Amino acid sequence: APRRKIVELIEHRLERERQVLEAMRRGKSTVDGLIAAIYPELDKRLFSLARWQVLAQLDKLVHEGKVRLVAADTYQVLN
C-alpha cells in the first residue's frame, strides 16, 4: 500500500539521521568521514549518490539547529 511505503521511507530517513548524528558524536566531522562511517561497504561507483544523501541529511540537521557547518565539508554536532 502507498501509505505503508511512505512510512517505510520516513523511517529509513530518520534512521539515517540517527546514523549521521551518532557518527558525528564519535568524532566524524567531514562529509567523507561520515560517508565512510555510514556506508562502510560502499561501491565507489555509488560515492556521489551517498555524498548527496549525506549532504541532504546535514542540510536538514543544520536547518533544525542540530549541527552547524564549521568549514568546507566539515560539520559539528550541537547537542
Image (cartoon, rainbow, N blue to C red):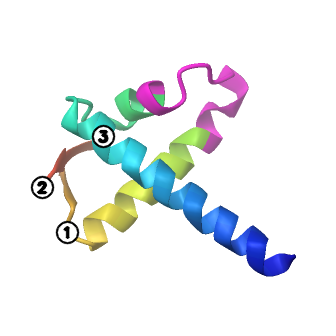
Residue assigned mark 3: 22
Bounds of the magenta span?
36-49
Image mark for residue 78: 2
CB within 8 Å, label 3 to label 2: no
The answer to whether residue 52 is above or below residue 64 is above
Amino acid under label 1? Gly
CB within 8 Å, label 2 to label 1: yes
Amino acid under label 3? Glu
Mark 3 or 1, nearer chain start = 3
Mark 3 or 2, nearer chain start = 3
50 to the left or right of 5:
left
Q: Is residue 34 magenta?
A: no
Amino acid under label 2? Leu
The answer to whether residue 38 is above or below residue 7 is above
Determine which quarter of the picture holds residue 65: bottom left
The answer to whether residue 60 is above or below residue 33 is below
Image mark for residue 12: none
| Point 53% across, 21% down: residue | 40
CA separation, marks 3 and 1? 16 Å
Mark 2 or 1, nearer chain start = 1
| Point 48% across, 59% down: residue | 14
CA separation, marks 2 and 1? 7 Å
